Image (cartoon, helix red, strand yellow):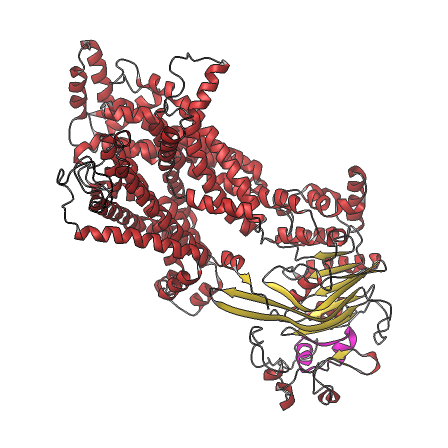
Amino acid sequence: MSPYVRYLAKRLGQFVLVVFVGITITFFVTHATPIDPVETTLSSAAAFGSTSPEAIAMLRQSLQELYGTGGSLYEQYLTFWGRILRGDFGPSLSAFPTPVATLIARALPWTIGLLVTATLLAWAGGNILGGLAGYYRDNRLLKAVGVISMGLHPIPYYIVAFVLLILFGYVFPILPLSGGYQMNLSAGLNATFILSVLKHSALPALSLILVGVGSWFMGMRALVSNIVTEDYVTYAELAGVDRNRILYAYVMRNAMSTQLTGLAMSLGAIFNGAIITEVVFGYPGIGSLLIDAVHAGDYSLVLGITTVSIIAVAAAVLLIDLLYPLLDPRVRVD
Amino acid sequence: MLGILRDLLRHNREFATGAALLAVVVAMSALSFFSPYPPDTIYIVPPDLPPSATYWMGTTSRGQDTFWQLTFAIRNTLLFGVSVALLSRIFSLVIGLLSGYLGGAVDRLLMSLNDTFVVIPLFPILVLFYFVMRDSMSWAMLALLMACLGWAYDARLIRSIVMSLRTREFTEHSVFSGMTTRQIVTQEHLPYVMPIVFSTALNNMNWSIGFEVTLSVLGFTNINTPTIGVMIYWANQHTALVAGIWWWILFPVVLVIITFIGFFLLAVSMNEFIDPRSRLSRMKGASA
Amino acid sequence: MTTATLQPMAASGDPTAAPTRAAPVVEVQNLKAYYQVSHYGVVREVRAVDDISLRIEPGEIYGLAGESSSGKTTLIKVIAAATRPPLNVVGGTVRFRFGGETVDLYGGAPPDLQALRWKSFSYIMQGSMNVLNPVRRIRHSFVDFAFRHLGQPMPQFMKAVGAHLERLHLRPGVLDAYPHELSGGMRQRVTIALATVCRPEFIIADEPTTALDVVVQKGVLAMIREVQLELGSSLLFVTHDMAVHANLCDRLGIMYAGRLVEEGVTARVFREPRHPYTRHLIASLPRIGDTKPREGLKGVPPSLADPPQGCRFHPRCPLAMPVCSERVPPMMPLAHGQGRVACFAATPEAIGKDAG
C-alpha cells in the first residue's frame, strides 16, 4: 500500500473518530437531564395550538427516538445513531411541521458561504502579511500591522462584531446591520440579489476577517522567524539568491504546510465564532437558527444543528487534511 | 521563578503592559469586597443615571450602581476562568505527560483522541447542554464541562515539550547517572514544563472567559449571578443601546477587552522568554 | 587506508616550498568579530575572532583546524560575508581578489556581493543536514543558485548542470528527487556539485565530512579533491578532524580560542609542530604501532566572553612563562618559510618585541 493511501486511510479514520466521539458526547448530553424532555416538549407543542393529533404523534415518535426514552441505554444509543445516519431529526417544533433537516438545509449554505470566504481571505491575507513581517523585520508598516494584530488577536469574534455593530449602526450607518439580503428581494442569480447578499454579509465577514488576519499574522510571523534560521534559508542567502525568491520558495513554501494544519485545528473555534457572529448580525445562518431554536424550546432543531455542526466541521478538516500532501512532499514517503 | 518574572517586568514591554492591564482588572475585582451594595439586589439606586461624581460609571436600568456591579461581575468572571483553567490543567498535564513519556501506541491513541477534541465545535454542544439542563445548570457544572472539553490544545503542547526533553542530552546523563524516573521528571523536566503549563493556563483563561461571556450574553447561564456576560445580557434585555444608556454596555466590554489583552500579552511574552530560539532572535546587538 | 597512517599528501608537490608570491585570493588582516549581545539588561561580548590574519593563495587548499569553541565557524562566516547581528565585525579587513579585481568586504562601501556570490566564491555546508529546501526538488536549488550566473537559456542550463553532475559521477536523475529521498552522503555530494557548478575561484568547505561514516567520507573527500584540481579553485577547508587535514590540505592553520596560533605547510606542522597546543593535537592522533597511552590536556577551552589575559592557552600550557599571562604573543614567521607561530616559548625573540 503506497504511503499516500496509508495517509488517506489514517485521515479517514480520524474523521470517523471525530464524528463518532462528537455524536456520542451529544447523546450523553441529551441524556444528562433528569426530567422527561419528551413530555415537556410535547406539552409546549400542544400549547401552540392547531396541531393535529397525527402531527403530535409523529413528533412524539421522533422525539422518543431522538431522546431515546424507553429501552436500555444501549438501545437508545443505537436508535439515536439510526436516526442521525438517516438525517431524520423529525419535525421542528417552532416551524411545525417542517422537518428539521429542511430548516438546516436552508440555513447551512449561508453559514458555509460566510465562513468559507471569510476564513480563506483571513488565512491567506494573514499568512502573506505575517510572512512578509517575519522576513522583512525592519519594515515599519509591517511592524505597525503587527501591533494592531496583537491587539485584535485575543479578542473574540463577537466582541469585534459588537463593536462593528455599534460603529456602523450609530456612527457610520452605511452598511446593513441584519439579515441576509434585503427583505423584498427574491432569491436568484441576478446582480441585485447578489449585491444585496454581499452588502449584508460585509459586516459579519469583516468581524471574522479582522480577528482572523490578526491571528494568522501572528502565527505566521513567529513561524517565519524560526524558519529563517534554518540551514536551507541560510544557504540560499549565502548563495546570493534574490530575497523575494527566498521568501516565496524557501520560507513561505515551508511555512504553508504548518499553517494548513493550523487551519484544520482552528476550524472548530472559527466555526464557534462564526455562528455567534451570525447572531449579533441576525445573519440567516445556522447560528441564528440555533439561538432561535433554544428560545423556542425546539429540541429537535437544536439537536439537529449540533449534529450537523460536528459532521460539517469534521468533513472540512478531512478536506484540508487531504490537501496537505500537496504542500509537504515528505508525507508521501512517510 | 520570581527572578524570571522580575526580569520580564523590567525588560519586556509586552509583559509589563500585560501585567499593568491585569493589575487594573484584579484591582477592580478586589474592590468587590468593599462594595456598599450587595451584588444581587436591584432597584437600590435611581436608575439610568449617566456617570457622575456620585456614580462613577452611572447606574443601570435595573437600579444598580454600574461601577460596583462591575466589580462583582469581573470577580465572578475571573473566578470562573481560573476554575476552568485549573481544572483543565489536570487533564492537559496528565494526557500530555503520559503521551510524551510513554510514546508509541499510547501516544498515537491519546493524540488521536486529542485531535478529536480539538476539532469538535464546542459551542453547539454547550448550547445543547444548557438547553437540556435549563435552570438546573450551575456555574460549577458549566466550569466542569468546559474543563472536560477544553484540555486538548494544551495537552499537545505539553506533549511536544516532554518529547523534546526526553531526547535531550541532559536527560540521558541523568538516566546514566542512575536517577529514578520520578527524580528525573520532577527535578530535571518539571522546571521546563511548568512555564508552558503556566502560559497555556493564561490562554485557557481567555478561552473560558470568552465562552462565559458568549453564553451569558445569550442568556444561557445563571443570569442571577453578576458576571461580565450577564451584565451585557441585562443591558440588552433593557435595550440599553437604543435607550442611550451606553455606560451599561461600554464599561463591561472595555474591562473584558482589557482582561483578554492582559492575559494574552502575559502568555505571549512568557512564551517568547521560554523558547530559546525566539530569545536568540530577539537579542539586539549592542554597538561597541 | 591512508588517513590512519598519516602520510600527508600535499597537492602542490614539494612540502617545504614557500607559498607563491602571487596575489592571494583571500587576504584577512587583523580581523576582529564579536558577538555583542544586550539581553534583559545583561551586556556580553563574545570575542569569537580576535585579531586573525591569514592569506590563501590561488589554487591552494588551506585547512583550518581547531576544537568546537575555537571560533573557526565564526571566522568562515565572516569571510563568507554571512554575518548577522549580534555578530559584528569590529575591526580588520577581508579582501578577495577575483579575476584581477580586489573586493574589500568590510573596508569601505559594501561591495555588490550579489554578483559575486556563487560565481566567484561559494560555500559547501554540512550537506547531510538541512541545507537543501525540503519542499522542492533538487533541480530548483540549482536554478535558484546558479542560473543567473551562467547566462544561458533554461534548456541549455539544465544540460550543463546534468553534464557537471555526470563529471562528478552523480546520476542526473538526482535533480528530480527531493532532499529527503537521498542519503546523507548523496546529499553532501549534491551540495558539492551545487557549490562548484559556476566554477568559483574560492570555495569554503564547512565540515563537509563530519557526520558522515568513514566509508562515505572517503568518497566525498575524493570528490572534493578531484573537483578542486579540475577547477583550480582555492579551498578553505574547516574541520576538527586532523586526519582529513593531513589527507587533503596544502597548508594548515590551527585556531585556539578565537586566535590563530600556528600556520604552515601541512607536512611540516605534522612533523614539527611548534606551538604547545598543536603539539598536543598532533600527539593525540593515533598511529599504527604506537601503544603509548594518550594523555589529555588539563582544563577546558576558555570562555570567549571572558578569555584569559595574554596568550589564551597559557592556563593549560606546559611551557607557560610569566610573560605569557601578560602579553598576547605575536604571530612570528619561522625560518625557511616553515610558516608562522604565535608562542613566546617557540619564538623567544618575540618577548622583546611589542605585543601584536
Q: Please identify the quadrant where the N terminus of chain B is shown.
A: bottom left
Q: Is residue A312 left or right of residue B281?
A: left
Residue A226, image x, y percentages: 54, 52
Q: Is residue A285 left or right of residue C335?
A: left
Q: How many marks?
A: 0
Residue at image position (22%, 25%) is A68
- Against B134, residue C63 (above or below) is below
Q: Nearer the viewer, residue B154 or C85?
A: C85
Q: Quadrant of residue C303?
A: bottom right
Is residue B184 something that shows in the picture? Answer: yes
Residue at image position (16%, 23%) is A40
User: Magenta stretch?
Assistant: C260-286
- Residue C276 is a magenta residue: yes
- Against A79, residue A145 (above or below) is below
Residue A149, image x, y percentages: 46, 44
Is residue B208 something that shows in the picture? Answer: no
Q: Please identify the quadrant where the C terminus of chain B is shown.
A: bottom right
Q: Quadrant of residue C227?
A: bottom right
- Residue B228 is a magenta residue: no
Residue B56, image x, y percentages: 23, 46
Q: Nearer the viewer, residue A294 or B72?
A: B72
Q: Is residue C49 left or right of residue B14?
A: right
Residue B97, image x, y percentages: 37, 53
Q: Is residue A16 left or right of residue B49?
A: right
Residue at image position (22%, 34%) is B234
